Image (tube, rainbow, N blue to C red):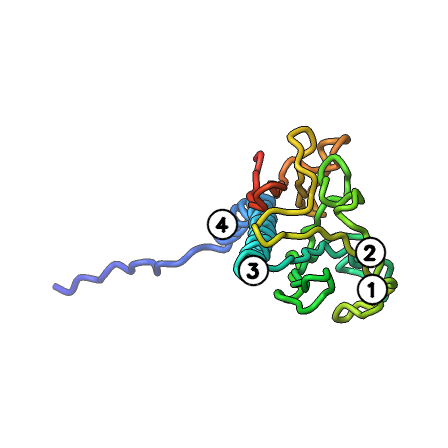
Amino acid sequence: MYRKRRRIPPNSFTMVELLVVMAIMTILAALSIPAILGVMRSSSLTTGSNRLVDQLNICRQFAMTKNCQVEFRFYQLPDPNAAASAAPSVYRAFQGFSLDYGGTQTNAITKVMYLPSQIYMSSNSTASTLLTTNNPPYYVPGTTAGNALGIYPPASYNYLDFHFKPDGSTDLTPSFASPWYVSLANQHDMIQNATTGLPANFITVQIDASTGRARYFRPN
């Protein structure tokens, strides 16, 4: 006797089920995006700090290896979202130069290194003692230097500098009371400390004036 086969429903979702899944995915994405952005900002901050410490160490090593003075510059440039001809406002690049025995600039030993986009060096004197004019560090307007810095004309950059000596030490005044450091942060992070002008997530790069060694600290 012929038996009629029972139809098996296809393996598929109904429109209601699809809408529910899409709603759940949208909620999860909305909850995770802030965390992902935070991780990306933190990663950029780490990258910028590593670049700065690496360049400081390269310049110190060059001074010791070549038995010469090396000038290390912190460049103040226009905001990364502004035109190259805008006024300098943010410290966000650095470079090293070798000097001859008379203290005259000879050659750039590193190219201009830029911090990742939105990462900056705080010019707050409490957060960054290396970005204050104490002779040293010495302040030089780009118009005094007279040369363009890449795409930036002389009027669009300034710099502060100090020097590594042939023994690896610096010309910064050694002081336990006033150590030498510069703090890096992300422009998108909200400022948490009114005194330092820094957000909760920042990195401080410190230089030992007597030995020239650089290292960084991250409170969070």
Residue drawn at (72%, 31%), measured in percent from left and top? Answer: 193
Figure quadrant of residue 51: bottom right
Which mark, residue 21? 4
Q: Earlier in the sequence, mark 2 or mark 4?
A: 4
- Mark 3 vs mark 1, foreground winner is 3
CB under 8 Å between discs 3 and 1? no
Is residue 85 something one can see in this rendering?
yes
Does 125 sit left or right of 10 as displayed?
Answer: right
Mark 3 vs mark 1: which is more N-terminal? 3
- Name the kind of residue labelled 1 in the image: Ala
Nearest to the observer: residue 191 or residue 66: 66
Q: Nearer the viewer, residue 3 or 125?
A: 125
Q: N-terminal of the two: label 3 or label 2?
A: 3
Residue 148 point in image, percent of width and height: 80, 70
Give me the residue at 66% from left, 37% from top: 174
Residue at image mark 1: 145
Question: The residue under label 2 is which amino acid type?
Answer: Val
Whether 12 is drawn above or below 218: the answer is below
As helix, strand or loop, the secondary structure at mark 1 comes to helix
Disc 3 marks which residue?
A: 62
Question: Which numbered mark, 1 or 4, is in the foreground of this view?
Answer: 1
In the rendered image, the quadrant that contains the C terminus is top right
Closer-to-camera residue (101/22): 101
